[in-house]
Image (cartoon, helix red, strand yellow):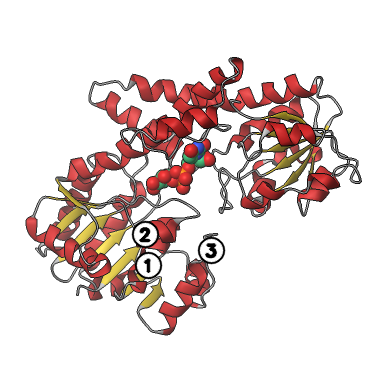
Amino acid sequence: MPILAVVGTGYVGLVTGVLLADFGHTVTCVDVDAEKINKLCNGQIPIYEPGLEPIVMRNLTCGRLHFTTDIRVAVEESEVIFITVGTPPKEDGRADIQYVLHAAREIAKWMNGYKVIVNKSTSPVGTARAIKQTIHQVLHERGVNFPFDVVSNPEFLREGTAIQDFMHPYRIVIGAENPHAIERMKAVYGFCYKNEVPTIEANLETAEMIKYASNAYLAMKVTYINEIANVCEKMRADIQLVAEAMGLDQRIGPSFLKAGPGYGGSCFPKDASALIRMAEDCGESLQLVEAMIKSNQLQKLRMVDKIRDGLGDLAGKNIAILGITFKPNTDDIRESPALVILPRLVELGAKLRVYDPCGRINGERAFRDILDSIAWCGDIYEAVSDSDATVILTDWDEFRSIDFDRYESLHAGKVLFDLRNLYERQPMTEKGFLYFGVGK
Ligand code: UDX
């Protein structure tokens, strides 16, 4: 079995490295951040991902998983080297691949024989070829001529369910020019999944495009159901039943049809913009994706209108906000609807009482301009105390079983904006609540 290295211990790199080790591979994870590596060597993980910590511990203990800042040793000892570094958006929406190319250069500096360099970072079509060129250049400068192959192997991990996603992927995508590299990758994954996972073999560009096309499509599904929800709301139709019935058609499928306050996160928004720029760069345009981005922005603002229409003038109102992360089981608030909705509510004069099971640290940073209007709360009931209304923004499980009978004793206003449709109108009305969902 090839020895593996993973360059970059961010979200994707860490989950990938740790789980490859858990499947029995020997894996060295490399990062330039010495403090992070020190912590990881002691089993402390720098990201919030349920279930990851014990897996790190058991693989460290049995010696299959290593963390180091020494890329030289990692490269020299490995045959297959994954690049999993960030590709942050540039101002114009294009993905910045400078860290990917830097990693490629570092790998090339220490290559000592045949290597398969696998790009897992989400990066535009053409990146794998740029990696190849970069490595050739460094080898040429070194005056050596080691054989190597570049592979594009996009990841499809979701935050919060990354372990499950890694253990049971829908598919594996391997893009390469050389059949030998594809065989080496199939050996790596075959060892994990006993060849039971559908595997798409493609050229480099196709593999790179699959990732973008998939993410934009999922974001579009969410956006479509949100638009239908907005129409349902005006027509006494119920989006949840509409979505359920739609999903029973196998051509549509039931997932990503939950109406809500708009998609967010570190991937959908950035990948959609990057895809548009990619299309522009080759003289094409993606009208649907462009419309989707606009519609998703509007959806977030629409939530503010919903709250204002329901509560009237917001000046001086206390609003309990339950959830600020872009989805449950993560501490990530990047592109979260909360980033648009909370400042706007404050602008309209509201005071916010915010509770999120994991998002507070990131929230304090992101909402630094409106901190005067935010009271951070330790649980649901502290947040709703003395509030005029409750807004459920994220579908954390603990928000599914709120004890509404406590509202009176907490002097909490019985107005619920359930922006994730966790409750039904009828029982809430019976409890004396004014209830607002999305699309029903
Ligand atoms: C996504 C992709 O799913 C994953 O394959 C890729 O590797 C990275 O991007 P992630 O951003 O972690 O994963 O979250 P995901 O669970 O896909 O949700 C994205 C956004 O869509 C969230 O804001 C979520 O709340 C929203 N969403 C999702 C809905 O509003 N309704 C749905 O039905 C599904």
Q: Is residue 243 left or right of residue 362?
A: left
The residue at which mark 1 appears reads as: 19
Q: Quadrant of the N terminus?
A: bottom left
Q: Quadrant of the C terminus?
A: top right
Report x, y in % for residue 391: 71, 36
- Judging depth in this view, the residue of 436 and 432 nearest the camera is 432
Q: Which mark is residue 46?
A: 3
Residue 51 drawn above or below residue 374: below
Name the front one of labels 3 and 2. 2
For marks 3 and 2, give the CA distance. Answer: 19 Å
Report x, y in % for residue 103: 31, 57
Report x, y in % for residue 373: 80, 37
CB of mark 2 within 8 Å of CB of mark 1?
yes
- Judging depth in this view, the residue of 321 and 109 nearest the camera is 321
- Quick one: which residue is furthest to the top in this view? 235
- Assess mark 2: CB under 8 A from ligand 1? no
Residue 334 drawn above or below residue 140: above
Q: Which mark is residue 166?
A: 2
* Residue at (74% x, 35% y) in the render: 428
Work out whether mark 1 precedes mark 3 in sequence or the reverse, and give the earlier one: 1
